Amino acid sequence: MDIQELIEQYQSLHLEEVIDHEQFNLISIDHHSTRIEGSTLTEVEAQVLINEGRTPKGKPLDDSLMVKDHHEALLFTLQAIKSGMSISKRFIQQINGLVMKSTGKTYNTVFGTIDSTTGAFRKGNVSAGNTYFPNYDKVDDFTTKLVSYIKEGMSRSLSVKEQLDLSFDAHYHLVAIHPFYDGNGRTSRLLMNAIQAYYGLPLAIVYSENKAAYIEAIIKTRETEDLSHFREFMQAEYTNLLSSEISKYQQMQKPSKGRGFTFLF
């Protein structure tokens, strides 16, 4: 089954009619995206935090703040796309500002103080492990080019696979630019979700348990300058997500012996 057929099967289930499905799906995005960045909250703890406002005992407060901020950034992103906001540098900065709202820091540079809670671009060079990202003075230009790339793609008639590839490409390129001091991964994944929401596609999740393979796909793509590596990783994650949701729904519909229906959540 190709990806378009899988999406059509998923959408035919009308999961939006299942009570709280959308909310739990959004919280799953919150959980995995923040878990990749070091949050120690379990998915159940993230659900209780978002739905009831209760922070888990024995966990760092910053982890809860990270999850709450991500949820607000996700809601903003989806609502902005729904209301017709276009992809722009300012939109990307707004997402990052919300992602870093409660955990961001200030950075003193030769250009002045940079407050990372505002979505301001970095004014210094950064690295992660053995990876060095573009010089700070190239960030604005590279991000402008990325926005143009996205808009040009969205202006054309694309197949479902091409729509997904555009969202995956935007995700990769923003990570590669690394325009912010912090929150680049979360912001990049939300930009990907924004493009998927624009096309009415199910929202992708990068599973936190696949973090190592995720990073390897980014590094391999960077080293080879071949987007197919990252696209293939993301399509596998996407296929796994949709197949899992379809399977859970089908299991829910099966009557258990003498007990009515079997509920999985």
Image (cartoon, rainbow, N blue to C red):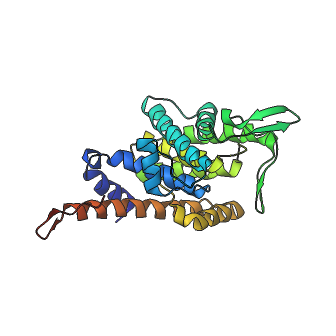
Residue at the bottom extreme? 257
Q: Is residue 169 left or right of residue 261?
A: right
Task: Give the side of residue 174 with respect to residue 189, left or right.
Answer: right
User: Which residue is rendered at x = 41% and y = 60% of the image?
Assistant: 241
Please identify the residue farthest to the right as the structure is shown.
110
Residue 147 at x, y percent in the picture: 61, 38
Considering the image in quadrants, where does the N terminus appear? bottom left
Q: Camera-side residue: 103 or 229?
A: 103
**Where is residue 219 shown, x and y percent of the image?**
68, 63
x and y percent of residue 244 in the render?
A: 36, 63
How many marks the image carries: the answer is 0
Q: Whole-percent x and y of residue 23?
A: 37, 45
Residue at 78% x, 49% y is 134
Q: What's the residue at 51%, 47% (across, down)? A: 55
Looking at the image, can residue 202 be seen? Answer: no
- Choose between 33 and 66: the one closer to the eye: 66
Residue lying furthest front in this view?
Answer: 57
Q: Residue furthest left?
A: 258
Q: Is residue 18 visible?
A: yes
8 lies left or right of 107: left
- Quarter location, residue 103: top right
Camera-side residue: 248 or 145?
248
Query: Which residue is located at x 59 percent, y 41 percent?
Result: 99
* Depth order, front residue of 162/52: 52
